[in-house]
Amino acid sequence: MLIFDTSIVLQILKNRDFYRDMREIVDEDVKITSITAYELLRGAIFVRLTRHSDREMNVIMSLLSEISVLPFGSEESRIASYIWAMLKEKGVSINDADIMISSICIGAKEKLITLDRDFEKIKGVYEGFEVEILEMS
């Protein structure tokens, strides 16, 4: 199983070539985290409110009905707190959503696929975190 970060999902939704490339290289079950679901939904709701368009909401709701979403629970909150403290001790800060996404991946013992280099910082403080950062061509 692989877990797609928000950056990957957004790129898939925006770019048909990227989607095609991902389908060719990924032959495993793909999931997202509840944090990614939140980030996608908040954007779609904002577009609905500001542009009076349901298009984005319909796309996101369709995606969420077809993909498994991994939750953020008590074990993940413990892992996230540890990661946050280790980063803070090193004087490094990244957004909480990335820390929470990482903790879900660690708890599930699954690899995260992302475009976001901030996840390298988490790998530097949590040995069991497996992440693959893709390059956009």
Image (spheres, grey):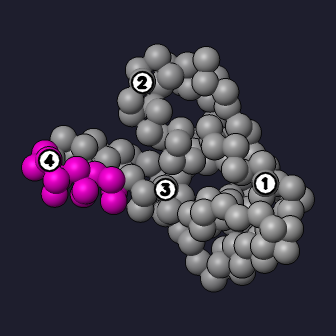
Indicate which label's residue lies in the foreground, 4 or 2: 4
Residue bearing mark 4: 51
Calculate the distance from the C-alpha at mark 3 to the C-alpha at mark 1. Answer: 19 Å
- Residue displayed at 67% across by 27% down: 135
- Amino acid carrying mark 2 in the image: Asn
Task: Give coordinates of residue 127: x percent, y percent.
Answer: 89, 59
Task: Give coordinates of residue 110: x percent, y percent.
Answer: 72, 52
For label 2, the SS is: loop
- Numbered label attached to residue 15: 2
Please report the bounds of the magenta region as a residue range.
41-53
Dot 3 and dot 2 residues touching (CB under 8 Å): no
- Amino acid carrying mark 4 in the image: Arg
- Amino acid carrying mark 1 in the image: Lys
Q: Tell me which numbered mark, 3 or 1, is placed earlier along the sequence.
A: 3
Position of 105 compared to 67: left or right? Answer: right
Q: Tell me which numbered mark, 4 or 1, is placed earlier along the sequence.
A: 4
Residue 65 visible in image? no
Dot 1 and dot 2 residues touching (CB under 8 Å): no
Residue bearing mark 3: 36
Quarter of image, res 16: top left
Q: Tell me which numbered mark, 4 or 2, is placed earlier along the sequence.
A: 2
Number of residues whose C-alpha sits closer than 10 Å to that of mark 1, classed few (under 14), some (14–19) or many (20 or more) = some
Establish if 127 lies above or below 15: below
Residue bearing mark 1: 121
Closer to us: 78 or 84: 84
Indicate which label's residue lies in the foreground, 1 or 2: 1
- Residue displayed at 85% across by 74% down: 89
Establish if 19 lies above or below 50: above
